[in-house]
Image (cartoon, rainbow, N blue to C red):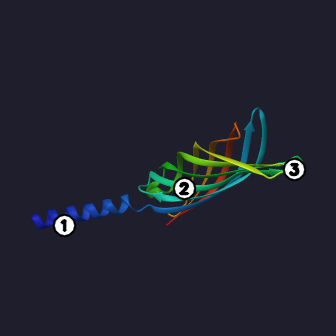
Amino acid sequence: MNKIHLLTGALALSVLSTSAFAEGPFVRVEGGRSHLNVNGSSDNDTTWSLRGGYAFTPNVAVEGFYSNLYDKSNSVGSAKVNSFGAGVVGKYNFGPENSGFFVDGRAGLARNKVKIGVPGLPSQSDSKVKPYYGVGAGYDFNRNVGVGLNYDWNKASAFGVSGKLRTVTLGAEYRF
């Protein structure tokens, strides 16, 4: 009888541990629009991000990323904002076995680098570490593939001037 209890307990633990650690690494590509606001002036641009990380459970992950948030130039000058960051992601799936519709949220710290150029002068850059946060919703087709719509907030400051960046992106994710 003790052997049956021991075998049943071992089998139950193996099933629980498999589902708890089944998530693993992921990669995500996002593209969309950014909106930059500095001292009441604003502009829009195309944005993209490459993200990757590790999901410890179906609901909790860590991520690292590189984002090209803003990159424009004209006859007066140029401005570029890039971001490297790391944070945590929380996710809730409404479907069975990590599939179907989901909502998520993310937050962390990002090193935002601002590069400014004026024709005839050397370009200047400055970077600061600032918090970022975002929300999203999407659909997971299965355990490995999903798509989502995301809204993120970033702050960038350089040369004593602060700006706010908001991005709306469509992303595709692959989980290994």
First in sequence: mark 1 vs mark 2: 1
For marks 1 and 3, give the one nearer the viewer: 3
Q: Amino acid at mark 2?
A: Gly
Where residue 140 appears, as percent x and y from the top left, is 54, 57
Distance from the alpha carbon under mark 1 to that under mark 2: 41 Å
Residue 19 in view of the camera: yes
Q: Residue furthest top?
A: 40
Cα–Cα gap, marks 3 and 2: 32 Å
> Does the residue at mark 3 contact the one at mark 2 (Cβ under 8 Å)?
no
Determine which residue is flagged by label 1: 7
> What residue is pinned by disc 2?
64
Under circle 1, the secondary element is helix
What residue appears at the point 44 percent right and 61 percent down from the top-left corner?
Answer: 23
Camera-nearest residue between 23 and 63 = 63
Residue placed at 75% from the left, 33% from the top? 39
Q: Look at the picture and state if 103 lies above or below 142.
A: above
Q: Residues within 10 Å of mark 3 (few under 14, many from 20)?
A: few
Amino acid carrying mark 3 in the image:
Asn
Q: Residue at x 48, y 63 (%)?
A: 25
Left or right of 17, for residue 7: left
Query: Which of labels 3 and 2 is toward the front?
Result: 3
Left or right relative to 139: residue 4: left
Sequence-earlier tag: 1 or 3:
1
Residue shown at the point (29%, 64%) measured from the top left: 14
Q: Position of residue 124 (x, y in %)?
A: 75, 49
Give residue 9's quadrant in the image.
bottom left
Q: Are marks 1 and 3 in contact (CB under 8 Å)?
A: no
Q: Residues within 10 Å of mark 2 (few under 14, many from 20)?
A: some
Q: Earlier in the sequence, mark 3 or mark 2?
A: 2
Residue where numbered disc 3 is placed: 74
At label 1, counting other C-alpha atoms closer than 10 Å, the crowd grade (few under 14, some 14-19, many 20 or more) is few
